[in-house]
Amino acid sequence: MKTVELKKVGTGKVGDKVGDLEPNITEDSLFVDGGEPVGFYLKSVSGRCLQLLELCNKEFRSDRVPKDKMNRSDLVAKARDAGTKYEDTNGVQQLSTLLGSMAPRPHMKRPYPTRSSVHLKPTAKTFIKGMLALAKECEGMVEAIMPDQYNKQLKLIEEWVPERWRFGRLFTSSISNYNISASVHKDSGNIKGASNVIFSTKKQSEGGHLHLPEYGATVESRHGSVLFYPAWRNLHGVTPIKPTVKGGYRNSLVFYPLKAFRGLK
C-alpha cells in the first residue's frame, strides 16, 4: 500500500457539479495529511468481504428490498425535448435505500429518531443481515490498517450513540446509492473525527469516482473497491455515472456515523 500525502491545491463550493474526471488514485493507498493517516483506499476486496458485497448488491437490486426512486434531471429534460417518455430514453435509473438509524427531523414533524422502515420488511432480511456482516468486515479492515482510528471511532460511537441506534460497531446508518452522482458537499451531520466506508459495485458503467476538489484527488470507483474517509472533513462529490449499455450501473454501499443521537435513549 502506497502513502498519498494530501496537499491542498484548490478549492470547491458546495453544490458544484463534478465533471468528467479520470481517477488519479487507482492503487491501494493510505491517505496522510500533515503526517496523520486520515483514510485508505483498496482497489479490490476479496474472499468473504467480496462475497458479502456481491450478495448485498444482488439483494438491493432485487424486488425484495424497498427503494426510493429518482429520475436523472438531465435525462428527463432530454426526453421532454424529444417529446418522449423518460422510460424510453437510454436512461439511468437512480435508486437509494437507507438502513439503520435515522436522525430526528423536527422540520418534518418527526422530532425523534427512528429506524429505517426497511427493517420492517420481511423480504429485506437477507439484505439487512448481509449489510451488517459487511459492516463487520470493513470494521476489521479499519482495525488492521488504521488501528488508532478504529479505537478513536469506537470511543466516539460509544460516547455519542446509545447502543440501540448503532449499525455495527463504528456506524449508525447505511445508504445504498444506485447510479447517484452527488454534487460537491460535506457530510455535516456526521460525528467529527469519525469516518465513512464506501464500497463500490459496477457493471458495464464508467465514472462514479469520488472527487476531492481541495486536494485535486479523484479516487477510482471500481467493482469491489472500498474507501475509508472522513466525509465530514472535506468537500467531495461524484463524477457522472455513464452506463456503457442499457442496464449498466454503479452502486455504492455506504456506512456512516451520525451525530444526532447523543443524549438520546
Image: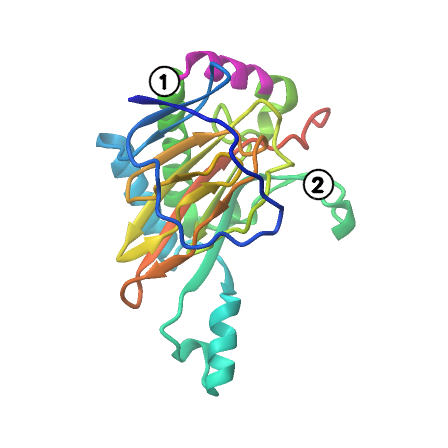
Q: Is residue 73 magenta?
A: no
Frontmost of labels 1 and 2 is: 1
What is the quadrant of the N terminus in the image?
top left
Q: Is residue 3 left or right of residue 16?
A: left
User: x%, y% of residue 263?
Assistant: 73, 24
Disc on res. 104 = 2
Instruction: Using a 10 Å C-alpha cutoff, classify the residue at mark 2 as few (fewer than 14 neighbours), some (14 to 19) or many (20 or more).
Output: some
User: x%, y% of residue 55?
Assistant: 30, 44
Which of the 4 quarters of the picture holds residue 87? Answer: bottom left
Q: Is residue 59 left or right of residue 156?
A: left
Question: In this orientation, which residue lies closer to the viewer: 120 or 208?
Answer: 208
Q: Identify the residue at image location x=59%, y=32%.
A: 232
Of the residues shown, which amino acid type is indicated by label 2? Answer: Pro
Which of the 4 quarters of the picture holds residue 40? Answer: top left
Q: Residue furthest bottom?
A: 83
Question: In this orientation, which residue lies closer to the viewer: 12 or 39?
Answer: 12
**Which stretch appears magenta?**
144-156
Which of the 4 quarters of the picture holds residue 131? Answer: top left
**Dots 1, 2 in contact, CB < 8 A:** no
Instruction: Using a 10 Å C-alpha cutoff, classify the residue at mark 1 as few (fewer than 14 neighbours), some (14 to 19) or many (20 or more).
Output: some
Q: Is residue 146 magenta?
A: yes
Question: In this orientation, which residue lies closer to the viewer: 161 or 211?
Answer: 211
Distance from disc 1 to disc 2, alpha carbons, whole Å, reads 33 Å
Q: Identify the residue at image location x=39%, y=50%.
A: 21
Element type at mark 1: helix
Q: Is residue 265 left or right of residue 169?
A: right
User: x%, y% of residue 169?
Assistant: 49, 23
Disc on res. 145 = 1
